[in-house]
Amino acid sequence: MSISIQARAIAPSPTFALNEKARLLREKGEPVISLGIGEPKNPTPINAILSSSAKLRVGDVKYSRVDGTPSLKKAIIRYTEEHYGRVVAPENIIVTTGAKQSLYNIIYTLVNPQDEVIMLAPYWVSYPEMIKMCYGVPVEVVPEDGTFYHRMQDIEQKVSSYTKAIIINSPNNPSGVMYSEAFVAELVEFCERKGIYLIMDDIYHKLVFDRKQWIPGYKHSNKDVENSRLIVVNGIAKSYGMTGFRIGWVVAPRKLVEVMTNVQGNMTSNPSVLLQSAAEGALTGQQATIENLRLTIENNRSIILNELKAFNDIKLCEPDGTFYCLPDFRAYDSDSSRLAKFILDKALVVTVPGAAFGMEGHLRLSYAGSVKHITEGIERIRWVLDPEAPNEIYIGDRKLIRDWL
Ligand SMILES: Cc1ncc(COP(=O)(O)O)c(C=O)c1O
């Protein structure tokens, strides 16, 4: 079989691979617990259902403009004004099939072969693969050991004449940390001054805990959207728990949106109008669902942190948001893929190896699921790794005895 060099270079999504494995085990009746995927359990907001079903009822499901329906764009304009303090035009927005396509459109539009895109480790798994798909070069900036925060001078050191963009994601998947306002301000100022695009993946911006305040990058730019180097990505997957609806969007200068629209027009055209109208319903409907989801996740975060305290040998930066944390498991095994596989084999718990996020020795744990799964999942991991945990456990109706420590 002849497969292109660039396609061969793309790694499979580690979350999808592990979830597939878990699904197969589950199908065999195994009591698998997934702390792998980032997907909240909330029901779809009612306004999203009503809005898309109204369209379906009358069969009004045709192509829309490639860059999104005018009415969804109107809702995004209002959202941008409310959360970003900027009034943007419809021409500054493109609606995409999930935030994933937003990111791909942006990178494809900006990056020439060999151009570099800087990512702050830990970074979302798909960034390096998307950059490579566009023949660009992903460049990592690693924080000081034991933290997930970066120093401006470490970022500046990685900037070269090939640097086209920096991508940040705050609150961050996989660590859950939110960058400080001072850091974001410095980064915005640096990128605007140097003419480097700053891609801000804000997909988790509403899932923030402890009354902390998420601050948009635009707050620190005195340029209007048209002349700014900031490019904003957002969507409904995480804040509204509408992962399957696959709607995201970009806010950017018009020229970039125009080119992204050409790219998307030749690739997927418009995202489904049914799903665009669901997104519109979510954005314009009752917003209480978001706060309910945030409170549930915040409570889950407290539970997982409490459970993790039982381990003597893991280190953890407490998450400020998202539904992930990224404990350092190097005291148990420095190879995160081997460790994730061991935990799945021994205790049927899915975790995601930190190596995929540029943080070897760590495991990403999702607390988007049920409290029962979180507590039982962590108890099982402790049974696998911690000699001080009781050496017997029930997994499903099987009593297991640990004989490897
Ligand atoms: C940081 C980050 N950006 C983008 C996405 C993609 O979101 P969507 O499901 O809207 O494509 C995800 C999904 O997991 C994510 O974690």
Image: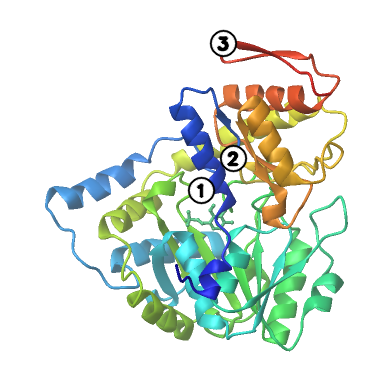
Examine the rendered structure and indicate whether residue 385 appears above or below residue 131.
above
**How many discs mark residues in the rendered view?**
3
Relative placement, left or right, of 185 versus 199 is right
Q: Which residue matches tag 2?
A: 36
Residue at 72%, 53% (x, y): give it.
355
Mark 2 and mark 1 lie on one chain; the one further toward the N terminus is 2
Q: Amino acid type of disc 1?
A: Lys
- Image quadrant of residue 310? top right
Q: Amino acid type of disc 2?
A: Gly
Q: Amino acid type of disc 3?
A: Asp
Residue at 54%, 77% (x, y): give it.
134
Residue 251 visible in the picture: no
x and y percent of residue 356 in the render? 67, 54
- Image quadrant of residue 247? bottom left
Q: Which residue matches tag 1?
A: 238
Circle 2 SS class: loop
Mark 2 and mark 3 lie on one chain; the one further toward the N terminus is 2
**Disc 1, ligand 1: is the CB inside 8 Å?**
yes
x and y percent of residue 345 in the render? 64, 31
Examine the rendered structure and indicate whether residue 98 appears above or below residue 403.
below
Q: How is the image coloured?
A: rainbow
- Per the model, the C-alpha gap separating discs 2 and 3 is 23 Å
- Looking at the image, the residue that sits furthest to the bottom is 161
Relative placement, left or right, of 149 versus 225 is right
Residue 24 visible in the picture: yes
220 or 179, which is in the foreground?
Answer: 179
Q: In the rendered image, which quarter contains the N terminus?
A: bottom left
- Image quadrant of residue 267? bottom left
- Per the model, the C-alpha gap separating discs 2 and 1 is 15 Å
Q: Which residue matches tag 3?
A: 397
Q: In the rendered image, which quarter contains the C terminus?
A: top right
